[in-house]
Amino acid sequence: MEALKFLLGVFLPYLALLVFVGGMLYRLARWKKLASPPMTLYPAPPDEAGNLKNLLKETLFFKSLFHGDRWLWVLAWLFHVVLALIFVGHFRVFTNVDAIFMKMGMSEQAILAMSGGAGGAAGVIILVTAIVLLVRRLVVQRAREITSVADYFALALIGLIVFTGDIMRFSSEHFDLSDTRSYFAGLATFSNVAGDPLLDNGVFLLHMTLALLLFMYIPFSKILHLGGFFFTHQLIRKN
Amino acid sequence: MKPEEMKEKVVSSIKAIEKAPRSMQMYMEICAKCGTCASVCPIYFGKPEKRYNPAERSDLVRRIYKRYCTMSGRLLGSLAGAQDFDPGKMQEWVEMFYECTGCRRCASFCPFGIDNSVITRKGRAVADQLGLTPKTMLKVIQVSLATGNTDNASPAAFKAAIEFLEEEMEEEHGGTKIKIPVDVVGAEYFYVPPSGDVLVNPEATMGVAKVFHVLGMQDRWTMSSKCFDGANYGLFTGDDKSMKADNKAYVEEARRLGVKVMLMGECGHAHRIMKMMMEKGRWWGDLPFSIINCMEWTAQQIEAGRLQFDKSKNAQPVTYHDPCNFGRSCGIVDEPRKIMEASCADFREMYPNRAENWCCGGGGGLSAMDEIKEFRMEVSGKKKLAQIRETGATYVATACSNCKRQLTQLMEHHGLEIEVGGVHDMLSRAILVDGKAAERVSYD
């Protein structure tokens, strides 16, 4: 048991960080190196400023998908926006960002209400959209017939991460963020966290392990669109 | 060819994706399999089956790429979406890649901007390396490289056709001589149509000649008796070498003639290769001439008020089909409309149009393949047929010989009395020469 806790709670976080950062840099460097003959698709913005604006629209609003498949757009947009919100929200888990909010004039209660309200809603919305996206894959023919194990795996992995996260958020047992903050502070300062009591929390350990697996999976899977997205739109919209 | 040899060739061709281009490699790696491409694809609209799903077609290449070029694919196999090449499926491979019209509509709506036509072209290039390009396509390329045009016409035959057109115009305009200059060294404009616009549907070329005549520029342009066909099927078969060889002859001819402007005709892929690929990609370095399309040029003259029309000559309801290569790939969408609106009394749009237009179903060279006519009529052309019907038009203008052939067959096959022609064709029927429009003789 101690070995497992060391493996997942001490070794894996560093490994995941290395694999994710290294993997993404490797991909970006490879893409950047490759020749890219002109392949403009119209309507193409006439200049760099227009190009940037178009990329922002794609990034923030999924412009192409909005025009292509409205139902999928609703699901995909909600899913990604909430995912981004949850990602940002997790900074409260890692470290004490509450101080920043307080400097901005928020009371401790207001911060807790925001976290409970927005964070709680996000936890529900993302679980629901993930499930609906899965159902869509199973039901909508044009998606089902091109879906492979890898596609189900990615969705299931994210679903499980969300589910275990929701358990911690919504369980009656109080989850104290000061525990996670001291644990991640330990990791960040390369202190020995092997004996941290947080690692006795099975749900937390599972949640974090799955999340770290996801991060390591990204550079080697279709979730690579996280970084690829910015390049591919530029390829066809560059005038 | 032995299966092992075939496999080796296919695999090495797909491994080359690791070297270039950027788009290809990224498309192999980031497709999320969401199915949006299928919902906007004319083929999948015509027949919603797995085989016609763009992501499935692209996966033929993607699976092999993953098997040989990604760590996850090598280690996890099908769990990571990887699969080895099966030589027994090569025939199906060729058929499937010639069931995509390369219209790029998927790229317009894909959340990542994945352009499946790039993958289709790669799939065809793989087939080409194995000598499996459909014979009809191969023949067009061979003829074009040997004669400079896809119709196997000699310079003498071309000159005879031009003389005939000049006689026609003289007759149409009560004895006014409207010239089509040929092989004039030192001319400013070098008109490069598809050969079909000289030999099959020559009204477009007559229209261009009339514009020059009305402007008083009848001595400032020329055609070439060696290079009168911009069509270039290397784009369709994925054979870069043929595509560049075919293209080079035209650039050299323009240099020889000493022209200032290469005036591309109503041929989408020819304009795309010349303007978007050759010029932008600097295949032959600096060019002593600019490249514009005859529709851009004529639209400019109309805007400047230099051309007058008798719209009553084109009284019937007319619609315009945006060729994918002009709309999506070159951004030429307003110009044909300016010409149509100036020369037609009842111009109607079909929807969606411009860059979002649906393909005619004959793009990517499919139009020339009679062996898949049934597929073109019943599957790939289905959406276009419905779109055209909705407009109520009795004339469909389009600026592409491939679209014209597909649409003409589509109308015949489905028993519709709808004429198909070009943009300058309509201009030719309505433009005023010495204050009078053509007294048109029937060409049927």
Image: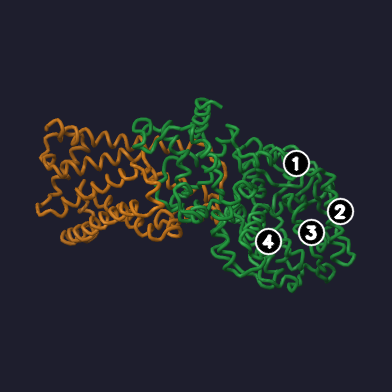
Chain colours: A orange, B green
Q: Which amino acid does label 2 sit on?
A: Glu
Tell me how far mark 4 sits from mark 2, CA to CA.
Answer: 24 Å
Q: Callout 4, which amino acid?
A: Val
> Relative to A61, does residue B83 appear above or below in the rendering?
above
Same chain, labels 1 and 3: yes
For mark 1, does the 10 Å Cα neighbourhood hold few (<14), some (14 to 19), or many (20 or more) residues?
many
Image coordinates of residue B85 in percent, x first then y, are 46, 32
Give the left or right position of residue B397, taking residue B16 as reference. right
On what subunit does the disc labeled 4 rest? B
Label 4 vs 3, first from the N-terminus = 3
| SS for callout 2 | helix
Pointer 3 residue: B206
First in sequence, mark 2 or 1: give its number.
1
According to the picture, the residue beneath numbered tag 4 turns out to be: B420
* Mark 2–mark 3 CB contact (< 8 Å): no
The residue drawn where x is 48% and y is 44% is B57
Q: Which residue in the structure is indicated by mark 1?
A: B148
